[in-house]
Image: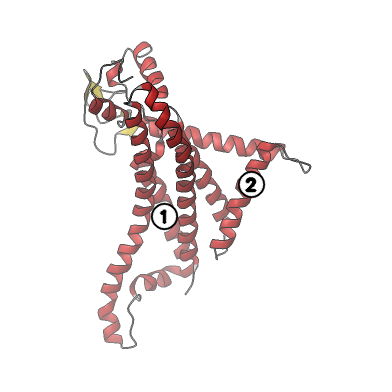
Amino acid sequence: MAEQHTLTSSEYIKHHLTNLTYGNLPGKGWTLAENGQEAKAMGFQAVHLDSLGWSIGLGLIFCFIFRMIAVRATTGVPGKFQAAIEMVVEFVSDSVRDSFHGNSKLVAPLALTIFAWIFLMNLMDLFPVDFLPYIAQWVGANVFGANPHAVFFKVVPSTDPNVTIGMSLSVFALIIIFSLKEKGFGGFAAELTLQPFSSQNILIKLILIPINFVLELVVFIARPISLALRLFGNMYAGELIFILIALLPFGVQWMLSVPWAIFHILIITLQAFIFMMLTIVYLSMASEKH
């Protein structure tokens, strides 16, 4: 695509890192640019259609696959696909059993959903960087009559901070819900104000409450932010490396992209695992009544 549209290296990279955005653009709809120049889309009224579409689509694929295996599961010798799914379920179940010390039927299904969903999102990074965007450009130009330079299409939802922050905020909301459910409002407030510093003296304790609250609030808010940025940063860097490799001559691309893709399989799996495990740990901490 870089050669076909005679884009410079910087334009090629910028084009691949731009989302297909709808909304908050006067007189515009499905594209972000006019005459090949990028337009600005700001605010909550703008929607990244590619990230949202792929996230929903991959979520439906996850539900379809796991439901299909659950319906067709046999008590005899399982097939290879059923055995692979059972290994994933057992792995997640063991992780929850070892790390979650509360009592909730929600955590195990949530952990399985997080791991499988993020893994599928990350897996999209293994598609050739020009393949799906080129199809989107062809559809945009031939079906909607759009300028091919103005058709943007990112296929890895986890490289969009809006997606990762959205997931982490959902986990953050669950942390608050679990904390209030297990400790009550008073216990949750005490957790945020009476540690790490404490004293038997009432006056000193009152003085330390705002200090404790500031320190605990920073740690509390840092959890969803770090959860989101860790996944986004690792996947964004991996995608950028694939884009840089695509700028090289065709023969060199295969020499570099294949080893990187093999190594990247570990990265996409590890990032899904880390997000899942931190979610389990955070919910376990929220369920403790110390």
| Tag 2: amino acid | Met
Q: Is disc 2 surrounded by few (<14), some (14 to 19) or many (20+) residues within 10 Å?
A: few
Q: Residue at x 21, y 31 (%)?
A: 40
* Residue 7: image location, x then y, percent: 25, 20
Side (left or right) of 63 relative to 42: right
- Would you name the residue on which mark 1 appears? 173
- Answer yes or no: is residue 129 visible: no
Q: Quadrant of residue 131?
A: top left
Side (left or right) of 111 relative to 180: right
Q: Residue at x 45, y 29 (%)?
A: 127
In this rendering, the count of numbered labels is 2
The tag earlier along the polypeptide, 2 or 1, is 2
> Against 204, is 287 above or below?
above
* Residue 159: image location, x then y, percent: 37, 39
Numbered circle sitting on residue 157: none
Which of the two residues, 98 or 5, is positioned nearer the viewer here?
5
> Against 180, is 205 above or below?
below
- Would you name the residue on which mark 2 appears? 87
* Residue 79: image location, x then y, percent: 71, 37
Q: Quadrant of residue 258?
A: top left
Q: Residue at x 57, y 50 (%)?
A: 109
Contact, CB < 8 Å: mark 2 with mark 1? no
* Residue 76: image location, x then y, percent: 79, 42
| Tag 1: amino acid | Ala
> Against 288, is 233 above or below?
above
Q: Which dot, 2 or 1, sits closer to the camera?
A: 2
Q: Is disc 1 surrounded by few (<14), some (14 to 19) or many (20+) residues within 10 Å?
A: few
Looking at the figure, which quarter contains the N terminus? top left
Which of the two residues, 234 or 194, is positioned nearer the viewer here?
234
Cα separation between marks 2 and 1: 29 Å
Q: Indicate the secondary structure of the residue bearing disc 2.
A: helix
